[in-house]
Image: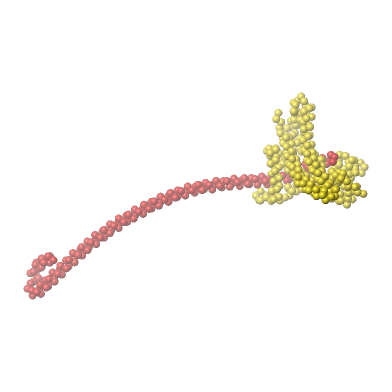
Chain colours: A red, B yellow
């Protein structure tokens, strides 16, 4: 248990191991640790950036969405206005057309009626003349009594 | 012819190093009977060999594990190694502060792990290695009596080992003191405190005592703690001399209890040695305030 040269040997051995550690052990471990630390902090940074970007994108998306919704409702409003206008126009036009058709139809009916009346008158007068001729046995000539007959026809 | 085994010889055997040295009468020898002739230039072969072995265990553990590159998942062993390095770095940062000194890290790591491993030898049951050494050296014909073969396997219970390391730290302290403060600054620090320039001899006396007390206490603290721990293990082991089952069980229980407690001492002393190493070096880096 006395102090002897072991003391000096041990100091030298100590120095040698410290030197080995200094040269070979410490730097390799530390460099890996530092590199990983850097990688991790870079990764955290990047993910933070990505988060920010995502948030920004979300905000932009919301804005666009809002705008689109507004536009859509405007378009809808316009379209419905236009549609109601078109319906109104069409209605008006149809009514006019219908009226026109009605008038022309009633006119043509009147014409037909008057034409039929004329025909009937003519035919009646012919029948009367015929009948009268037969009754009077040729005494009455057509030419003679034409004026009388026309008067009669007009009275019908 | 074997000597009779007494409690005293048992304790003595456990506390004696395997020392080799040069003697006048028989030249180089490791025989303990010539111990007194060896003088200073003798070597505790057991302490030296075990400490070198453990040093290589440390280097092997930290150097030859598979270190995955930074972008890969670290292996479990790598995690452990990095944890140690991190721990050392944290302590340096808290005691030393940010420093550009590149030696302090590896130095502290070596101190921590190496001292821890040497202390850890204390947890090997006290008789295993000495008994093995006895039998081997007797079988190999190195000694005539197995009880003359000594082997003390906890290097830190040898003051030469702890003081040797403290000496290393001491030399580094002086080296950095002179490097940072200059030779003049270092001498001024030794002579001009605490009483100014009119009391230089007295100052020098005080400061030198302080300077030398640091490594001495550093080495003796570790030695004392481990030596005491080892001593208690030996004393507990002595209970078995009574050859009664009661003492046997008691010895076993005490052994377990002390070993559990000693785990704390082992790691704590390694940690303290490291922290003090850092502290002394940081004091060497401090520039004087006045």
Depth check: give the residue in front, B238 or A24: B238
Q: Tell me, yes or no, if residue B221 can be seen here.
A: yes
Depth check: give the residue in front, B114 or B239: B239
Side of B1 where B47 appears, left or right: left
Q: Tell me, yes or no, if residue B120 can be seen here.
A: no
Residue at horizontal 38 percent and vertical 51 percent from the top: A78
Q: Residue B164: name its quadrant.
A: top right
Residue B251: x, y in percent? 81, 48
Side of B181 where A113 appears, left or right: left
Q: Residue A87: name its quadrant.
A: bottom left
Side of A61 where A76 appears, left or right: left
Residue at horizontal 92 percent and vertical 42 percent from the top: B25
Residue B193: x, y in percent? 75, 28
Taking the view exactly as shown, the residue that stands out farthest to the top is: B198
Taking the view exactly as shown, the residue that stands out farthest to the left is: A139
Q: Quadrant of the C terminus of chain A?
A: bottom left
Residue B171: x, y in percent? 77, 37
Residue A115: x, y in percent? 18, 65
Q: Quadrant of the N terminus of chain A?
A: top right
Residue B194 vertical position relative to residue B153 in the rendered view, above or below: above
Residue B82 vertical position relative to residue A87 in the rendered view, above or below: above
Residue at horizontal 53 percent and vertical 47 percent from the top: A55
Q: Residue A110: name its quadrant.
A: bottom left
In this figure, what is the number of numbered marks? 0
């Amino acid at each position: 248990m006395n102090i002897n040269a072991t003391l000096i040997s041990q100091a030298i051995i100590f120095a040698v191991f410290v030197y080995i550690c200094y040269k070979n052990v410490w730097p390799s471990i530390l460099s890996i640790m530092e590199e990983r630390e850097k990688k991790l902090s870079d990764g955290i940074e990047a993910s933070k950036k990505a988060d920010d970007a995502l948030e920004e994108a979300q905000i932009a998306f919301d804005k666009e969405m809002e705008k689109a919704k507004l536009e859509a409702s405007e378009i809808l409003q316009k379209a419905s206005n236009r549609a109601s206008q078109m319906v109104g126009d069409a209605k008006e036009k149809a009514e006019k057309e219908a009226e026109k058709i009605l008038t022309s139809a009633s006119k043509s009916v009147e014409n037909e009626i008057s034409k039929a009346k004329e025909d009937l008158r003519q035919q009646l007068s012919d029948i009367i003349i015929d009948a009268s001729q037969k009754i009077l046995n040729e005494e009455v000539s057509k030419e003679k009594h034409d004026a009388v007959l026309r008067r009669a026809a007009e009275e019908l | 012819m074997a000597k009779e085994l007494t409690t005293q010889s048992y304790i003595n055997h456990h506390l004696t190093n395997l020392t080799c040295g040069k003697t006048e009468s028989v030249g180089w020898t490791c025989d303990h009977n010539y111990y007194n002739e060896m003088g200073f230039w003798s070597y505790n072969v057991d302490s030296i060999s075990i400490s070198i072995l453990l040093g290589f265990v440390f280097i092997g553990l930290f150097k030859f594990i598979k270190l995955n590159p930074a972008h890969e998942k670290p292996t479990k062993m790598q995690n452990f190694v990095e944890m140690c390095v991190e721990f050392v770095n944290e302590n340096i940062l808290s005691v030393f502060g940010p420093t550009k000194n590149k030696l302090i890290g590896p130095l502290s790591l070596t101190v921590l792990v190496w001292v821890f491993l040497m202390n850890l030898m204390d947890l090997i049951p006290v008789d295993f290695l000495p008994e093995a050494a006895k039998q081997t050296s007797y079988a190999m014909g190195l000694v005539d009596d197995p009880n003359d073969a000594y082997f003390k396997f906890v290097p830190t219970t040898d003051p030469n080992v702890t003081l040797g390391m403290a000496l290393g730290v001491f030399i580094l302290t002086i080296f950095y003191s002179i490097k940072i403060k200059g030779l003049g600054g270092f001498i001024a620090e030794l002579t001009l405190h605490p009483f100014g320039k009119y009391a230089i001899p007295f100052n020098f006396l005080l400061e030198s005592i302080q300077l030398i007390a640091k490594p001495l206490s550093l080495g003796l603290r570790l030695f004392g703690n481990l030596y005491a721990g080892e001593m208690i293990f030996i004393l507990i082991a002595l209970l078995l001399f009574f050859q009664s089952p009661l003492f046997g069980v008691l010895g076993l229980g005490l052994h377990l209890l002390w070993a559990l407690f000693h785990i704390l001492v082992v790691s704590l002393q390694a940690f303290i040695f490291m922290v003090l190493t850092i502290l002394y070096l940081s004091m060497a880096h401090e520039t004087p305030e006045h």
